[in-house]
């Protein structure tokens, strides 16, 4: 299998990727040592896996028989109080996410965090291995900064990347199963807004129907298990997510959307939303146009994922872990068919950008503010795919003209 991937076996590539992996592993080890020394807390009372605390506290409330109270901030804060020293980790997820959260509080916080991250990381590694089909991909995973950022934050990007990667990977071979898997994104639907558009444009009706059935089933199941009051409370406080986005409750430097970049550059709320809306509309048009062309399966899957990440205004740094999917798909294709112009540069920038901007976070250097890299990298990757698709079509058209002459 490695013979099909000479670039991955090249000594220079091994040296670069291994070097980056060693740097990040040592950085993570240093961070974990600091957390261990301070009882699980870092600088500014940052709790290891602090985002996971909101899932664990939600589980605590569900197991106590009060799922509707998850969406009452003052009561959810009380559930977090045993571990949270300051602030509040809000629960913005729909009740479908509670289906995943239920068992988490059966174990103490840190044990539950370890199991959650380990299991979801294993599923992510399996998806990437399925794409690249080489043990060397495990080294590449260790060299990808969002892996550590997601683990330290205690977030669910390993899971969402696994769902999108697995579902899109098999949608041509097993459309019904792919739909059932993609429907699981109802736990975090704002990261899958481009998926139904893509399924409609490409006429994958069986996948779309099964995705809808899967999503609706989870909604109904959550209503039956947790009660309608839970959904009513969720709908009642859902506006708080928009307020958090507008007020900067989630730091704009941690968000990776066009909206956040515009806000950091000084744009007001309305102006930033207009800019983001125009970019999202443009990305949707690019998605539709690309899917109507004759493009490879890897390019098709990649443009869908890129659109998912660019369309949503609420994309955080750990969500950029999902960029590993187009990186893996396109690397696999270009290793077999040859690298087009600029492709190695774009792959390198996409792979290394998270490390350049977020290494201070892993080192817990609060003096250095991270900068959003997500939307520029996504747009750059989209440009490369559109450029390559256009040139391939022009070359094919030129070949037909020559043949006709």
Image: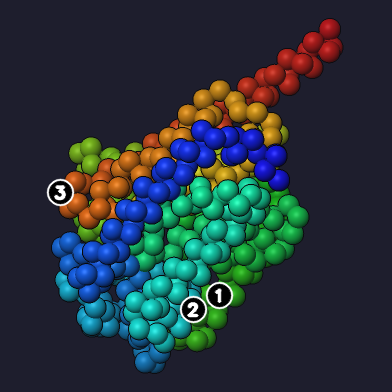
Name the residue carrying label 2: 99
Name the residue carrying label 3: 367
Q: Residue furthest right?
A: 404
Horizontally, residue 111 falls left or right of residue 382, namely: left
Q: Compute the Cα span from label 3 to label 1.
A: 43 Å
Q: Is residue 188 above or below residue 400?
A: below
SS class, disc 2: helix
Are the residues flagged by discs 2 and 1 in contact, CB closer than 8 Å?
yes
Which sits earlier in the primary sequence, circle 2 or circle 3? 2
Nearer to us of marks 3 and 1 is 3
SS class, disc 1: helix
Q: Is residue 274 visible?
A: no
Q: Residues within 10 Å of mark 2 (few under 14, many from 20)?
A: some
Q: Which mark is residue 125?
A: none
Q: Residue at x 29, y 68 (%)?
A: 48
Q: Residue at x 34, y 57 (%)?
A: 28
Q: Is residue 18 above or below residue 13?
A: below
| Residue 289 x/y as whole percent | 60, 35
Q: Residues within 10 Å of mark 3 (few under 14, many from 20)?
A: few
Q: Compute the Cα span from label 2 to label 1.
A: 8 Å
SS class, disc 3: loop
Which sits earlier in the primary sequence, circle 3 or circle 1? 1
| Residue 362 x/y as whole percent | 29, 54
Name the residue carrying label 1: 218
Which sits earlier in the primary sequence, circle 2 or circle 1? 2
| Residue 170 x/y as whole percent | 69, 56
Q: Residue at x 56, y 26 (%)?
A: 387
Q: Residue furthest bottom?
A: 65
Q: Nearer the viewer, residue 81 or 19?
A: 19
Query: In the picture, which quadrant includes the C terminus?
Result: top right
Horizontally, residue 261 falls left or right of residue 161, namely: left
Nearer to us of marks 2 and 1 is 2
């Amino acid at each position: 299998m490695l013979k099909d991937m000479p670039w991955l076996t090249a000594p220079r590539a091994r040296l670069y990727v291994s070097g980056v992996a060693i740097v990040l592993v040592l950085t993570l080890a240093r961070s974990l040592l600091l957390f261990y020394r301070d009882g699980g807390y870092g600088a500014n009372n940052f709790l290891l896996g602090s985002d996971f605390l909101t899932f664990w506290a939600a589980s605590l409330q569900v197991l106590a028989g009060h799922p509707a109270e998850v969406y009452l901030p003052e009561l959810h804060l009380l559930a977090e109080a045993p571990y949270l020293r300051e602030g509040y980790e809000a629960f913005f997820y729909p009740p479908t996410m509670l289906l995943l959260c239920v068992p988490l509080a059966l174990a103490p916080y840190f044990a539950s965090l370890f199991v959650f991250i380990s299991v979801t990381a294993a599923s992510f590694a399996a998806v990437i291995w399925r794409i690249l089909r080489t043990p060397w991909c495990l080294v590449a995973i260790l060299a990808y900064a969002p892996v550590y950022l997601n683990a330290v934050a205690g977030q669910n990007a390993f899971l969402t990347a696994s769902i999108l990667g697995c579902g899109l990977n098999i949608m041509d071979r097993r459309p019904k199963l792919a739909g059932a898997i993609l429907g699981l994104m109802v736990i975090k639907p704002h990261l899958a807004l481009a998926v139904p558009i893509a399924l409609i444009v490409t006429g994958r009706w069986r996948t779309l129907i099964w995705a809808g059935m899967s999503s609706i089933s989870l909604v109904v199941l959550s209503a039956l298990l947790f009660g309608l009051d839970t959904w009513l409370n969720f709908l009642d406080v859902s506006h708080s997510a928009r307020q958090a986005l507008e007020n900067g409750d989630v730091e704009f430097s941690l968000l990776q959307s066009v909206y956040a970049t515009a806000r950091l550059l000084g744009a007001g709320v309305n102006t930033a939303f207009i800019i983001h809306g125009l970019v999202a509309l443009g990305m949707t048009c690019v998605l539709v146009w690309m899917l109507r062309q004759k493009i490879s399966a890897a390019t098709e899957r990649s443009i869908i994922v890129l659109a998912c990440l660019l369309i949503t205004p609420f994309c955080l740094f750990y969500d950029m872990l999902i960029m590993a999917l187009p990186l893996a798909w396109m690397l696999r294709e270009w290793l077999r068919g040859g690298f087009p112009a600029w492709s190695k540069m774009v792959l390198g920038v996409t792979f290394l950008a998270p490390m350049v901007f977020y290494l201070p976070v892993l080192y817990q250097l609060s003096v250095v503010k991270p900068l959003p890299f997500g939307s520029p990298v996504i747009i750059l990757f989209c440009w490369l795919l559109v450029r390559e698709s256009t040139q391939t079509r022009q070359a094919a058209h030129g070949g037909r003209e020559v043949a006709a002459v």
